[in-house]
Amino acid sequence: MKSILVAKSISFESIKIIDNLGTCQAIASSCTQESLILAPGVVIDLITIPKGSFQMGARDLMTGADAAEVHTVNIDSFKLGKYPVSQALYRHVMGTNPSFFHGDHLPVENVNWFDAKNFCNKLSTLTGLKFRLASESEWEYSARGGTSSRFYCGNIITSDLGNYMAEVSWEDGPTGLWRQSTTALGTFPPNPFGLYDMQGNVFDWCEDIYGSYSNAPSDGTPNLTANGPIERVLRGGSWYHTPIACTTTCRLKINPSYRGPDISFRIALSN
């Protein structure tokens, strides 16, 4: 029997950095959240991502030459996990917890791409809903939240707005606290779409095979074309990486069998 998602409108404040000192401005926003309770304390929260078009990629080489080919992508509305998958949710579905840092409200980590896919398949069977990983273009569109800056919060980042190796500054921005571990989901403010941990804490696996943007789909579907070894895409930065990895355009290519204490995923659901 198909599970029922309960929808409600959520009001929240996102943060915009307005100067290189890290001065912040609160931006009032709203989104539609759909929730599914699997067990006491085990809830899936999904944010409805609006339909739209955006310019994917970077216009400079700051985040790597492979992200510099800017191209237009059209995204259909879909649902994306408000947070990375929590350890409580992963354990409920899979019966195990592979994480290096332990806590129900921490993101699950130390999972490879195949683990993430297996989770989506088991959760789909459990709920009757077809869960999946986001495509790389869906992920970037969602991370930007309608912005065109290097981070959703502006052109610099601070350790008040994300969990990363903040002993290293981004350009002229300030240094900050390096926490050296994952942080609880919801610790930092959400982006303009209402999503958490889209810059730092843990990387998200995407569906795509890593490849050039020259032949990438323009309709939001994953790039499944391989011209060499099949490596998958990681996005979003982590507690273990410098701020460059937290930019909205930075891409990592990783063997899909690799696991690490900074690698997680979030789930998606087509409308």
Image (cartoon, grey):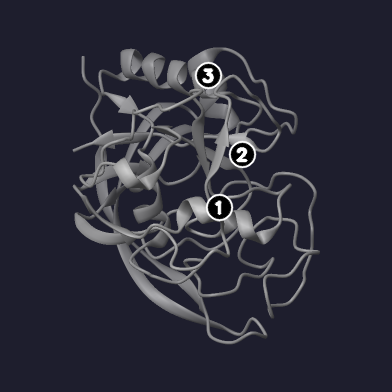
Q: Position of residue 27 (x, y in %)?
A: 41, 77
**Type of amino acid at the residue the image marks with label 2:** His
Are the residues tagged 2 and 1 within 8 Å (C-beta)?
yes
Measure the C-alpha gap from mark 1 to mark 3. 23 Å
The residue identified by callout 3 is 115
Q: Nearer the N terminus, badge 1 or badge 3? A: 3
Please tell me whether mark 3 sits on a helix, a strand or a loop.
helix
Residue at screen point 75% across, 29% down: 100
Above or below, 116 against 28 in this view is above
Q: Residue at x 67, y 85 (%)?
A: 21
Whether residue 235 is visible here, answered yes or no, is yes
What label does residue 91 carry, if any?
Answer: none
Q: How many neighbours does mark 2 have within 10 angstroms: few (below 14), some (14-19), or many (20 or more)?
A: some
Residues tagged 1 and 3 counted as in contact (Cβ below 8 A): no
Disc 1 marks which residue?
A: 186
Q: Secondary structure at mark 2?
A: loop
Give the left or right position of residue 31, taking residue 153 as reference.
Answer: left
Residue position for label 2:
105
| Residue at image point 63% right, 59% down | 244
Image coordinates of residue 185 in percent, x first then y, are: 58, 47
**Residue plotted at (25% across, 24% down):** 3
Q: Earlier in the sequence, mark 3 or mark 2?
A: 2
* Lower sequence index among marks 2 and 1: 2
Compared with residue 60, is residue 114 higher up or lower down, i.e. above or below?
above
Question: Looking at numbered disc 1 in the image, what kind of residue is underneath it?
Answer: Gly
Q: What amino acid is labelled 3 in the image? A: Asp
Closer mark to the observer between disc 1 and disc 3: 3
Vertical position of residue 13 compared to residue 226: above or below: below
Q: Quadrant of residue 29?
A: bottom left
